[in-house]
Image (cartoon, rainbow, N blue to C red):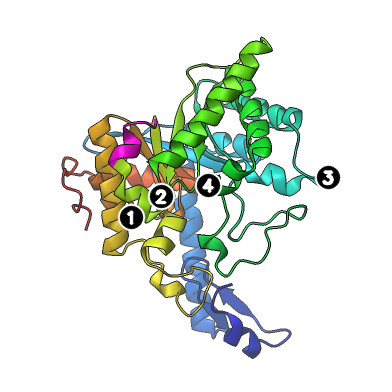
């Protein structure tokens, strides 16, 4: 837990603790009044949760009549099923790196990946399944892969940079994704894109894999959509150019926030600066949505901000039409959306302040 070091020194065996997962606050040996207050809060949340579940499988429509898509985040086939069972209208982020993390003998082969992607696609059916290509590096490592020492891994060799420099690994994944694309509404999303050139190189790799599958007479969806995860300031600055070539955007607010604010979210001394509600982050989100809207492509959000009920109103006001959240957050988010009656989407990039 970020920033909990000093608190841990004060905790003794047998101490009663209250941990607020929303604020990160830890209360050691709470008095009776504090404990009673938190128990009441838990009971209230449970009642609200039960109320939300009643509308989990009903579309989220604002009071003003705007239909908003609520999708799920997943890292495995089991999590895809859990998200759909929770009311998600598809999967807005399938974290493919977990297949690599769970592989014990090295990089998962094409058939292993194909089976996982196929099962996920079959579960989703006609509903969208957005699979992010390997997003490794930063705070995510593989036991069988040597990244070497990096002074700042978050600014180093990670995500699409790894894929583009390890073409054999990248092409294995792309072939598996393409083969699985005939079993559902599968889309491919590239992480950590910082330039149009990177997107074009990734797209070229997809086209080369398509040519290979054509030669093998293997089935795939030739019209599969390729998208970009917007999670760097560079991608925000060229969002209009990326929107002219990509078929969709998904805003990854976890990384975007720490990059915009120049603050490592894992560093307790500066973690407080990683505030997704900061004006700079809001403007980055609004600029991205405006670029997508101008180009006529979809733009969603799959970072933690998407599930924050305090952010829902301004995200909708900025023009967000597609949220992707963890399974437990699906029903509460839908209920929150139904309570809002908002004006028309603002047109200016800085509108979401």
Please state which of the two labelled residues, at mark 4 or mark 3, is closer to the viewer.
Answer: 3
Q: Earlier in the sequence, mark 4 or mark 3?
A: 3
Q: Is residue 309 left or right of residue 210?
A: left
Q: Is residue 110 magenta?
A: no
Residue under pointer 3: 105
Q: Nearer the viewer, residue 259 or 79?
A: 259
Please give the label number shown on residue 211.
none
Residue under pointer 1: 311
Q: Report the residue that reaches farthest toward the right.
A: 105
Q: Specify whether residue 158 is in view.
A: yes
State the image quarter where residue 85 is shown: top right
Q: Is residue 253 left or right of residue 66?
A: right
The answer to whether the residue labelled 1 contacts the one labelled 4, judged by CB atoms less than 8 Å apart, is no
Residue under pointer 2: 306
For label 1, the crowd category at 10 Å Cα-Cα, with few meaning under 14, some 14 to 19 and many 20 or more, is some
Q: Specify whether residue 88 is in view.
A: no
Kind of element beneath mark 2: helix
Seen at 61% across and 56% down, the residue is: 137
Q: Earlier in the sequence, mark 1 or mark 3?
A: 3
Please state which of the two labelled residues, at mark 1 or mark 3, is closer to the viewer.
Answer: 3
Q: CA distance from mark 2 to mark 3?
A: 35 Å
Q: CA distance from mark 2 to mark 1?
A: 7 Å
Q: CA distance from mark 1 to mark 4?
A: 16 Å
The answer to whether the residue labelled 2 contacts the one labelled 1, judged by CB atoms less than 8 Å apart, is yes
Q: Is residue 215 above or below residue 143?
A: above
Seen at 57% across and 42% down, the residue is: 164
The answer to whether the residue labelled 4 contacts the one labelled 2, judged by CB atoms less than 8 Å apart, is no
Please state which of the two labelled residues, at mark 2 or mark 3, is closer to the viewer.
Answer: 3
Q: Earlier in the sequence, mark 4 or mark 2?
A: 2
Seen at 45% across and 51% down, the residue is: 303
Q: Is residue 17 left or right of residue 236?
A: right
């Amino acid at each position: 837990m970020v920033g909990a070091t000093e608190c841990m020194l004060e905790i003794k065996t047998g101490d009663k603790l209250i941990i607020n997962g929303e604020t990160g606050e830890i209360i050691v040996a709470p008095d009776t009044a504090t404990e009673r207050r938190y128990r009441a809060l838990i009971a209230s949340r449970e009642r609200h949760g039960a109320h939300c579940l009643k509308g989990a499988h009903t579309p989220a429509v604002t009071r003003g009549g705007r239909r908003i898509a609520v999708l799920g985040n997943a890292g495995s086939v089991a999590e895809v099923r859990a998200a759909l069972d929770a009311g998600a209208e598809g999967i807005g982020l399938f974290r493919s790196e977990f297949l690599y993390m769970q592989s014990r003998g090295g990089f998962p082969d094409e058939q292993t990946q194909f089976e996982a992607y196929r099962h996920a696609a079959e579960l989703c059916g006609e509903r969208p399944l957005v699979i992010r290509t390997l997003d490794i590096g930063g705070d995510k490592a593989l036991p069988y892969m040597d990244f070497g020492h990096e002074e700042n891994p978050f600014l180093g060799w990670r995500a699409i940079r790894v894929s583009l420099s390890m073409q054999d690994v990248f092409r294995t994944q792309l072939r598996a994704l393409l083969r699985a694309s005939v079993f559902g509404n599968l889309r491919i999303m590239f992480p950590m894109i910082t330039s149009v050139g990177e997107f074009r190189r990734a797209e070229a790799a997809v086209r080369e894999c398509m040519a290979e599958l054509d030669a093998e007479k293997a089935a795939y969806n030739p019209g599969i959509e390729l998208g970009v995860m917007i999670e760097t300031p560079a991608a925000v600055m060229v969002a209009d150019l990326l929107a002219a070539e990509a078929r969709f955007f998904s805003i990854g607010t976890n990384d975007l926030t720490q990059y915009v604010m120049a603050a490592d979210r894992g560093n307790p001394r500066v973690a407080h600066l990683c505030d997704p509600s900061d004006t700079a982050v809001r403007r980055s989100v609004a600029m991205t949505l405006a670029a997508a809207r101008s180009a006529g492509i979809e733009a969603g959000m799959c970072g933690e901000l998407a599930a924050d009920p305090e952010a829902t109103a301004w995200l909708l006001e900025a023009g967000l039409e597609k949220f992707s959240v963890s399974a437990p957050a699906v029903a509460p988010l839908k209920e929150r959306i139904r309570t809002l009656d908002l004006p028309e989407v603002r047109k200016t990039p800085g509108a979401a302040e």
